[in-house]
């Protein structure tokens, strides 16, 4: 069974940190670009960070640059999102997604291009 499962969300105070994990099963995630996306209540899903297959090229949304870091461990079929200096506006449900592109250098921050697999999401709430 092919699936992506996110974990690591929770309640954190402003300025705090969290590490989200994305566990892939049923497919070899090494060949797929992995992206993290988020959706706040009533808002559209937006791209946060992505990492390409094989070469590990990364892209970040401007609003997380310098605060979030995406990484992957292909041996474990895992991807991660390290989040620091969290702000109230980071509150959202965070999703990981995977898509196999022809290029191993490419990863998009557009949810509409990451269509192969999606997880169910993990909630991140930043509040004091």
Image (cartoon, rainbow, N blue to C red):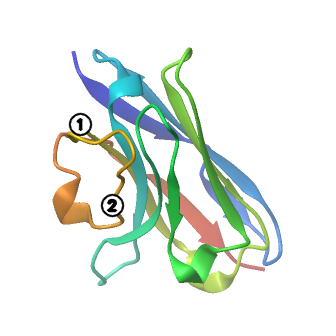
Return the mark for residue 108: 2
Residue 87 drawn at (x, y percent): 69, 81
User: Who is closer to the viewer here, 47 or 121?
Assistant: 47
In the image, is 90 to the left or to the right of 12? left
In the image, is 81 to the left or to the right of 97? right
Classed neighbour count for the residue bearing mark 1: other residues with Cα under 10 Å, few (<14), some (14–19), many (≥20): many
* Mark earlier in primary sequence (1, 2): 1
Q: Quadrant of the C terminus?
A: bottom right
Find disc 1 in the rendering and name its residue: 100
Name the outermost residue toward the right.
Answer: 15
Residue 3 drawn at (x, y percent): 29, 27
Indicate whether 109 appears above or below 74.
below
User: Who is closer to the viewer here, 24 or 14?
Assistant: 24
Identify the residue at image location x=77%, y=65%: 84
In the image, is 123 to the left or to the right of 40? right
Q: Are marks 1 and 2 in contact (CB under 8 Å)?
A: no
Classed neighbour count for the residue bearing mark 2: other residues with Cα under 10 Å, few (<14), some (14–19), many (≥20): many
Indicate whether 26 appears above or below 9.
above
Asked which quadrant contains residue 83, the reply is bottom right
Identify the residue at image location x=53%, y=55%: 58
Residue 26 drawn at (x, y percent): 28, 15
Asked which quadrant contains residue 68, the reply is bottom right
State how far apart marks 1 and 2 are (Cα): 11 Å
The local secondary structure at tag 2 comes to loop
């Amino acid at each position: 069974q092919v699936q992506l499962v996110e974990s690591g969300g929770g309640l954190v105070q402003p300025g705090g940190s969290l590490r989200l994990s994305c566990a892939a099963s049923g497919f070899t995630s090494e060949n797929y670009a992995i992206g993290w996306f988020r959706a706040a209540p009533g808002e559209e899903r937006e791209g946060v960070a992505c990492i390409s297959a094989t070469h590990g090229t990364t892209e970040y949304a401007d609003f997380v640059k310098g605060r979030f870091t995406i990484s992957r461990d292909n041996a474990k079929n895992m991807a991660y999102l390290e989040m620091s200096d969290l702000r109230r506006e980071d509150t959202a449900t965070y999703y990981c997604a995977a898509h196999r592109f022809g290029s191993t250098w490419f990863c998009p921050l557009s949810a509409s291009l990451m269509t192969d697999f999606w997880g169910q999401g993990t909630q991140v709430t930043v509040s004091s």
